[in-house]
Amino acid sequence: MAGDLTRAAAEELLADLVAIPSVNPSLDSAGGGESAIAAFAVQWLRARGLAAQLEEAAPGRPNVHAAAGAGGRDLCLYAHLDTVDAGAMEIDPFAGAVAGGRLYGRGAYDMKGGLAAVLMAAAALAAGGPHGGRLSVALVADEEYASVGADAYVRVHRPAACILTEPTDGRLVLTHKGFVWLEVATRGRAAHGSRWDLGVSAIGRMAPVVAALEAFDRDVLRARQDPLVGPASLHCAVISGGTGVSTYAAQCRLQVERRLLPGESAHAAAAEIERIVRGAAPDAEVAAYFSRPGLVGGMDAPVSRAVLAAAAAVTGTEPTVEGAAYWTDAAIFAEAGIPAVIFGPTGAGAHGSVEWVEVDSVVAVARILVEAARRFWA
């Protein structure tokens, strides 16, 4: 049924979604990608009266865009289609087993529970009519790697606001951290391990860099606090160097992630890290190669007020308003001038060996999305 917001409907849809592997191929070369689940979503939405279509975000990496209604403010409901790999799971990742009100499988929590809620809410809104507003559905590829799907979506579509259903356990998330990734390189001189007089270890030259970055994280960054997301931070993530135990290492590379507070500049953060690195190793090379801004939001946005009031009306309890230490595609929508908030279902095991979502929470989120849309359009 088009407007079916029941536990049975959610359980059936969730099982269908989990049964379709959608592992991000940028994370796992054997991953099937988003094509199969995108095709399923298009057919499911079309069968329930929405105009739905595939849009290529990158070769072989489709988004889904769907719409209903005309005129009025355009509210977008978002979910991402991809998951991380399932190789280390302790359960059947695609069986969609149900026990104790929980549905298990890869992506059940991150974020096919949110995807199911978006689909169910979109069907209910299309069946009842958007009531003077326009509904958009954004189901995007590649959130788990480089977010090419969200980037592509906002280049084409500019809704008035967006609700993302990443799992938040029923909390309303208005702000979150960003990040910048950097690579540091030190150079040495290759020589036989016996030739201490000739060899210079690039790994040895990297050691004071690691120590300086760790001290900077501990002594400086942790003191920079945001009331909703906590402190700024960095960590030394990946290090590589050397060719053999009896050879002085000619080069060493270190990858660093710096987590940004909402509103903090990636460029300024990278320049600060470069100063720290050069203070420890003047000849080191430093390059920032990828960054994403944090999400800056607040209760002044109409979409924030709509979700807060809708959640209180549906559940009888106003949700807590929080920030998050992780990053989401909400920042891409916000950077494009589209106010975005995050509200999603309850579960556990994102990227883990046992992953599940609470089915009743998926139904609750779907109902809250419907109510939030009506309040947003009122």
Image: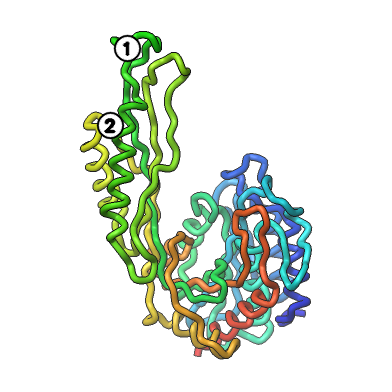
Above-or-below relation of 306 to 243: below
Q: Is residue 115 left or right of residue 253?
A: right
Circle 1 residues within 10 Å: few <14, some 14–19, many ≥20: few
* Number of numbered discs overlaid on the protein picture: 2
> Residue 78: x, y in percent?
55, 68
Residue at image location 67% in from the left, 41% down from the top: 30
- Distance of label 1 from label 2 (alpha carbons): 22 Å
Residue drawn at (42%, 15%), measured in percent from left and top? 247
| Residue name at image x 50 percent, y 88 percent | 309
Q: Which residue in the protein does label 2 denote? A: 284
Q: Nearer the viewer, residue 239 or 47?
A: 239
Does dot 2 land on a helix, a strand or a loop?
Answer: loop
Q: Is residue 52 above or below residue 4?
A: above
> In which quadrant of the rendered view does residue 239 lie?
top left
Badge 1 is on which residue? Answer: 196
Residue 137, given in percent of the width and then of the height, sits at 58, 70
Above-or-below relation of 51 to 212: below
Q: Amino acid at mark 1?
A: Trp
Q: How is the image coloured?
A: rainbow
Q: Secondary structure at mark 1?
A: loop
Q: Amino acid at mark 2?
A: Ala
> Is 367 on the left-hand or right-hand side of 177?
right
Residue 102 in the image: state x and y as whole percent. 72, 69
- Specify whether 244 is left or right of 281: right
Q: In terms of depth relative to the viewer, which is nearer, 91 or 333? A: 91
Residue located 76% across and 62% down the image: 96
User: Height in image: 188 above or below 373?
Assistant: above
Q: Quadrant of the N terminus?
A: bottom right
* Of callouts 1 and 2, the N-terminal one: 1
